[in-house]
Image (cartoon, coloured by chain):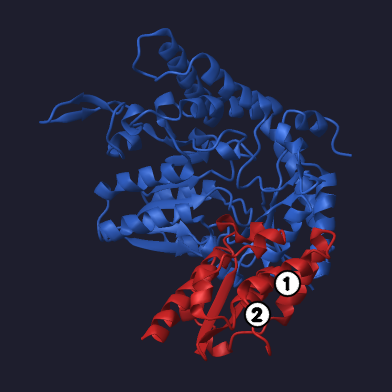
Amino acid sequence: MSQYRSINDIQDEIIDEFSMFDDWMQRYEYMIELGKSLQLIDEQYKTDEYTIKGCQSKVWVFAELKNNTIDFTADSDAIITKGIIALLLRVFSGQHPKDILDADLYFIDKIGLKEHLSPTRANGLVSMIKQIRLYAVAYQTQIEE
Amino acid sequence: MTNTTFDVQAIRKDFPILHREVNGRPLVYFDNAATSQTPKQVIDVIVDYYSRYNANIHRGVHTLSQEATDAYEKAREILRAHLNAKEASEIIFTSGTTHSINLVANGFQALLGPDDELMVSEMEHHSNIVPWQMLCEKTGSTLKVVPMNERGELNMEAFDKLLNSKTKLVFCNHVSNALGSINPIEEIINKAHAFGAAVLIDGAQAAPHFKADVQKLDVDFYTISAHKVCGPTGVGLLYGKLDWLEKLPPYQGGGEMIAEVSFEKTTYAGLPHKFEAGTPNIAGGIAFGAAIDYMNAIGFEQIAAYEHELLVYATEKLKQIEGLRIIGEAENKASVISFNVGSIHPYDIGAILDKLGVAVRTGHHCAQPVMHHFQIPGTVRASFAFYNTKEEIDSLAEAVKKAVSMLQ
């Protein structure tokens, strides 16, 4: 990324992208493509320690602090879940921990994928967002020290 | 079309929910093994209860309470007759199969010790595993597992080897929720009894498809959940042989289950009230009876024959899809098909099927040991009821093809 873009800039950009699609099928096809292109977590981190167990699909998340911003990598065993992860990481990766903690996550709702963030879907995404925020809390504390 | 004696279109008219749309498409409901749909005859019973005679049972002298008590006890009698139990007091109303199993597991705590063994099958729902593990932790007893083969059939040779005079209790489902396999419960019961072990059969997945005769089976405990037999959620039954129910201590203390209470000593009520503490799900119990009446009016033989037709049709249809693998191909199967396609995650297929209006279950179906056996994260499960049609199976097959084409 050459130029800094805020979390909301990126969310608006994604909403804009999705507004081009006419129906759910195009949205899903795009997500599946995104899922396939997700920059994957290093295999060494695909361990229990970094696993978020949904009832249905598994998610792995790893985070590193680089120049006071957090670099996230992740993976999932389900491709649609991976597509949503790709979007989440596009929003959160490279952001300052404080900005992550202050963020209002509105794009998922706006692009019609809300059902995937329902706890009943049990795909690990709700826990993944919690985990992203936990990393942000931890790194924010580290920066302040 | 379908066989001539069975008018599925007429039956479908009884189920208001089958006529709704999901995501702009007509609903195809194939998650019957989780919860069956409710006919208006049963919905009407619930509405009638709350509209006309909602009152606490077994206590009041007033008319409403009398009417509610009569209806509730009449439902118990319907369920007794359905299972051919000897006595109505052998039918305990519970909140469902999970509650029924926990009630028995709790009762056995006083009867088991460290030298005793319990036997469970590898293909159980977690609700027929975890209560027994908890029991073993408390009593020090050992839990033995009867394995299954690649087709999803119990290995009865292994069963024979595991069974011995230390075995006190054997529990097994009548039909596997994850695979649809129908287990040889007559054989299991007879063999277990020869060693003096009691047998609990989880009938949750069998009850939607066929009638069990508890006297003929000579089973010690049998469980059913109402929501799988066109009844409401949150109610079910435990059948127990009178001797066993008398032997087991009460599960929960409270109102309804007592004879006399003082701070020095409380004596318990007789059966079935001993196990029915607190105000029960009265409307649910009455509606449970109505649901069984509804299904009996259609006829379980008719239901089983029609569902078998659906199973055969769907199996053939789905097998034509490239890369589709059916998990669970037991010789005797209820109308349940668990499958995966290639290496596609079941969640992905389920999410797309939902968009196409097809409701299936995806995941491990609360039977993780089954998934471990087949080394898969889960399956897509389509389960068929007597109100489903071959046309709906065609829609399922088309939807799966669509999902696969998007996901591959």
Which secondary structure, mark 2? loop
Residue situated in front as seen by the camera: B165 or B143: B143
Circles 1 and 2, Cβ within 8 Å, touching? The answer is yes
Pointer 2: what residue?
A5
Position of residue A96 relative to residue B65, above or below, is: below
Between B46 and B325, the residue placed more toward the observer is: B46
Residue B378 image-quadrant placement:
bottom right
- Left or right: where does residue A85 sit relative to residue B386? left
Residue B345 lies, in percent from the top left, at 68, 69
Query: Is B238 in front, or is B353?
Result: B353
Say whether mark 2 and mark 1 are on the same chain: yes
Q: What's the amino acid at mark 1?
A: Glu
Taking A69 as reference, is B174 above or below it?
A: above
Q: Residues within 10 Å of mark 1 (few under 14, many from 20)?
A: some
Q: Is residue A84 above or below residue B225?
A: below
What residue sits right under mark 1 in the picture? A13
Chain identity for the colour red used in the image: A
Mark 2 belongs to chain: A
Q: CA distance from mark 1 to mark 2?
A: 10 Å
Residue B219 seen anywhere in this rendered image of the structure:
no
Name the image quarter holding residue B330: bottom right
Number of labels in the image equals 2
Residue B392 is left or right of residue B108, and the answer is right
Give the residue displayed 58% in from the left and 46% down from the top. Answer: B205
Q: Quadrant of residue B279?
A: top left
The residue at the point 27 percent across, 57 percent down is B138
At label 2, which amino acid type do we have?
A: Arg
Colour of the chain lettered B: blue
Q: Residue furthest left?
A: B264
Q: Residue at x 56, y 34 (%)?
A: B232
For label 1, the SS is helix
